[in-house]
Amino acid sequence: MATSLGSNTYNRQNWEDSDFPILCQTCLGENPYIRMTKEKYGKECKICARPFTVFRWCPGVRMRFKKTEVCQTCSKMKNVCQTCLLDLEYGLPIQVRDTSLCIKDDMPRSDVNKEYYSQNMEREIQNSDGTRPLGILGKSQAPSDVLLKLARTTPYYKRNRPHICSFWVKGECKRGEECPYRHEKPTDPEDPLADQNIKDRYHGINDPVADKLLKRASTLPRLELPEDKSITTLYIGGLGENLTDSELRNHFYQFGEIRSITLVERQQCAFVQFVTRQGAELAVEKSFNKLIINGLRLVVKWGRAQAAKAQHANDGFSEMGTRLQPVPGLPTTLPPPSALEEEASANYFNLDPSISPALMNISLPPNPPAPGFVPPMFRPMGPPPPPPMGLRPPGHIHYPSQDPQRMGAHAAVRHSD
């Protein structure tokens, strides 16, 4: 082992001996029960070149085996995962995090200076409580808006997939479905993402993944202010099943006085109404595309005005923006008037059916009583019987319960002696 570890054999007291690795949730896998192999002083760290304990495991079914690549000292100095070298808090490359926080990498590159720097950092790690990052990262200010917008809140297990089968690319793989590697087209060699270096990723320079994320951050959409100044309500979506209104109030009360919070559990959304427009605008500025509560990234949008809600409801939509389902058995639109109704209307006014009184620009005399008119005092009590089927207008719905003969009513028959 001494031969494979190179020039570090003289300083064996600084070799790392750990019991468990420092990993992110993605590299660890979704299975809570996994087997790990532990090899004491198995390899040299790819950053500081000091021997460390290597852990190897399989994160899940149809996934490739993964192992630790850097020592825990280098991992704690940058607060990154020992395998993927992504930030443990935001799940982003080091270059994205350092660029957003305006942190400059001051780690030495020469062998002697790296050894001296690592020893000093180990001493600082032993004296710390282990609850906060070390070095310049521990002295940085609050996270920036770019970090909150780009932060990954859920594990990305797709990163654990097997490598591409080189034999399949050449058309020589004979394993078929039993092959543990992927049978997919390889990445274009000219693609910048195909050329990644673990040292550049750790030091935060020339990282193609970080460049891609920073370009995405510059093109993120912005939420425009509505022209109606009376709108002080915000729509909050993606709440999940366990988020409560008190947790929303604990976040939004800092921006202004809250009038009400309406939680719609079925749609997993909520409506937060502020007293002032200034408080609502401040909440949108501080929460849009970067609001994370209980590990959930929430959607923040402006609510609609009352007039817009009414028009939206008339168009067949609810207040939450979902289309209303038609009631079974009821017509969606009013049926056109029947021929009998048009003829009765024409006879009532004694006019041509094609001419409207409004178009003739004349004043009509008081309406005469229609033929067959019965005064109210002589009308029979109870609901009128339904018209015959032949005289009903098209589209009219008649329920059997409207027929008095089907409601248990019986005509009284008087028998004479």
Image: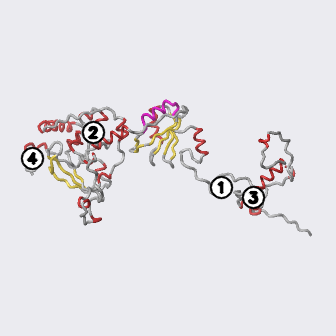
- For label 1, the SS is loop
Mark 4–mark 1 Cα distance, whole angstroms, equals 84 Å
Q: Magenta region: which residues? A: 274-288
Residue 359 located within the stretch drawn in magenta: no
Point out the frontmost of discs 3 and 4. 3
Q: Which mark is residue 392?
A: 3
Say above or below: 217 vs 172. above
For label 1, the crowd category at 10 Å Cα-Cα, with few meaning under 14, some 14 to 19 and many 20 or more, is few
Q: Which residue is mark 4?
A: 6
- For label 4, the SS is helix
For label 4, the crowd category at 10 Å Cα-Cα, with few meaning under 14, some 14 to 19 and many 20 or more, is few
Residue type indicated by callout 1? Leu
Left-right relation of 302 to 405: left
Q: Which residue is mark 1?
A: 330
Mark 2–mark 1 Cα distance, whole angstroms, equals 61 Å
Q: Is residue 290 visible?
A: no
Q: Earlier in the sequence, mark 4 or mark 2?
A: 4
Q: Earlier in the sequence, mark 2 or mark 1?
A: 2
Q: Which residue is mark 2?
A: 95
Point out the frontmost of discs 4 and 2. 2
Q: Which mark is residue 311?
A: none
Mark 4–mark 2 Cα distance, whole angstroms, equals 30 Å
Q: Earlier in the sequence, mark 3 or mark 1?
A: 1
| Residue 372 placement (x, y as % from top left) | 86, 53
Residue at image position (83%, 51%) is 347
Mark 3–mark 2 Cα distance, whole angstroms, equals 76 Å
